């Protein structure tokens, strides 16, 4: 019985050393940690009117005070929904890769949807003033 307990204690001690050594080796390097942090890229979305488009780039013009032009990189994996051309109202989903915005999906929007998203005024009243006689 005494030999059994000694053997069990020895196995337990060896297991603890193996776990401690393995844990110390599992620390990632700085570059691996940076790569892991960049892996889950956030997807952003914006809307605007297509100013120009070709096989590699898309430029849209955003309306409003905070508007302006946004340029996106387009690649073979960019999904296109609808007929996207100059003057089209679009929604662009994209991911930022450094200072580059890479379009993941471009969807054409109906002009009616764009107009309603721009409008901030109240709708006109449908009742008419009574005519004077």
Image (spheres, rainbow, N blue to C red):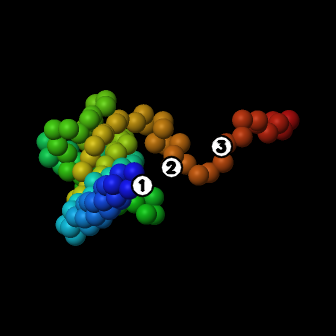
Vertical order, 81 against 21 (above or below): above
Mark 2 in CB contact with mark 1 (< 8 angstroms): yes
Q: Position of residue 87 (x, y in %)?
A: 30, 42
State the image coordinates of residue 68 (x, y, percent, origin top left): 35, 61
Q: Crowdedness of circle 3 by 10 Å Cα count: few (<14), some, many (20+)?
A: few
Q: Front-most of 52 and 132?
A: 52
| Residue 127 relative to residue 84: left or right | right
* Mark 2 neighbour density, 10 Å: few (under 14) some (14–19) many (20 or more): few
- Find residue 63 and name its label: 1
The circle drawn on residue 123 is 3
Residue 128 image offset from top left, x and y in percent: 76, 36
Nearer to me, 116 or 19 = 19
Mark 3–mark 1 contact, CB under 8 Å?
no
- Badge number at residue 118: 2
**Residue in front for this viewpoint, 114 or 55:** 55
Q: What element carries label 2?
A: helix
Residue at the spot x=43%, y=63% of the render?
66
């Amino acid at each position: 019985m005494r030999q059994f307990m000694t053997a069990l204690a020895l196995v337990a001690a060896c297991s603890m050393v193996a776990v401690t050594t393995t844990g110390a080796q599992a620390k990632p390097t700085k570059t691996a940690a940076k790569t892991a942090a960049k892996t889950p890229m956030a997807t952003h979305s914006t809307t605007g009117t297509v100013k120009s488009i070709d096989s590699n780039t898309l430029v849209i013009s955003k309306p409003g005070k905070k508007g302006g032009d946004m340029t996106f990189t387009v690649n073979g994996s960019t999904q296109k929904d609808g007929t996207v051309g100059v003057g089209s109202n679009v929604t662009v989903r994209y991911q930022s890769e450094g200072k580059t915005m890479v379009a993941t999906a471009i969807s054409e929007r109906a002009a009616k949807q764009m107009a309603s998203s721009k409008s901030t005024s109240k709708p006109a009243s449908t009742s008419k003033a009574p005519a004077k006689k």
